[in-house]
Amino acid sequence: MKKIAPSILSADFGRLAEEIQAVERAGADWIHLDIMDGHFVPNITAGPILVEAARRATKLPLDAHLMIENAEKYIPEFVKAGADSISVHYEACRDLKGTLALIHKLGAKASVAINPATSVSAILPVLSEVDMVLIMTVDPGFPGQGFISSCVSKVEELKKILQSKNLQIDIEVDGGIKPDNIYLTSQAGATAFVAGSAIFKSSDYKKTIAALRANL
Ligand code: DX5
Ligand code: ZN
């Protein structure tokens, strides 16, 4: 089943638990948590404390997207805080295989994320070691940016590679996903869809999630 993962980056942080519960009631499948360090990306959010707060608000799977350097150092804390899956960036990891293995060893799902400028070929060596690949459809750092449509061909390319290797893992897309472009990524083979501003800046979360799902 295809998953809709609201990114709480565009939620009202003063009412975080309520916002998470509202998207859960509105039909969200996962909750996407953007962790930024001000180094790998120019923006800062919060660390494991954010995951821990989300964990208390919902039983939905928590999909943590780490846009940080030295991710390996913090992974135990993110798992302990309740992250079900952890995405680490290819561009930010010195020892990608080791980092993915650590996530698995601690009992979470492991995912590798790639920026728009990174080619799919870069992650071929780890495809058999991940549960998901996150293909960024904006440059990571900020919500509300425009969808980069040239990334759709990377989704197609990855899907073909996964089929040829008989690997059944999720392909997640993240950045600028809206009801009017989600089908492009879905047709290309994406199976999980992050949407931040499209959902949290809308007046009716349920209608927006239904519109995203209707266009898959
Ligand atoms: C961008 C983050 C995204 C972002 C999505 O760096 O990884 O998850 O919050 O927000 P929208 O859907 O507004 O692009
Ligand atoms: Zn994200």
Image: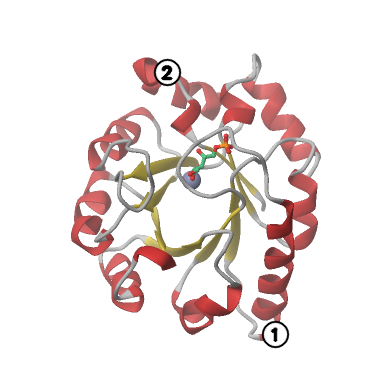
Measuring 58% from the left and 59% from the top, which residue is drawn there?
116
Measuring 45% from the left and 63% from the top, which residue is drawn there?
111
Q: Residues within 10 Å of mark 2 (few under 14, many from 20)?
A: some
Q: Residues within 10 Å of mark 1 (few under 14, many from 20)?
A: few
Query: Which tag, 1 or 2, sits closer to the chain's start?
Result: 2
Horizontal and vertical percent position of residue 123? 51, 76
User: In the rendered image, which residue does mark 2 sit on?
Assistant: 18
Horizontal and vertical percent position of residue 149? 73, 52
- Residue 4 shows which numbered tag? none
Q: Inspect the image, locate mark 2, and give the three-letter code of the amino acid beneath it.
A: Glu
Measuring 33% from the left and 36% from the top, which residue is drawn there?
45
Is residue 26 visible to the viewer in this orientation of the structure? Answer: no
Q: Tell me if residue 14 comes above or below residue 42 in the rendering.
A: above
Measuring 48% from the left and 48% from the top, which residue is drawn there?
140
- Residue 164 shows which numbered tag? 1
Picture colour scheme: secondary structure
Disc 1 to disc 2, C-alpha distance: 43 Å
Q: Tell me if residue 166 comes above or below residue 190 in the rendering.
A: below
Is residue 151 visible to the viewer in this orientation of the structure? Answer: yes
For residue 78, side relative to residue 109 (left or right) = left
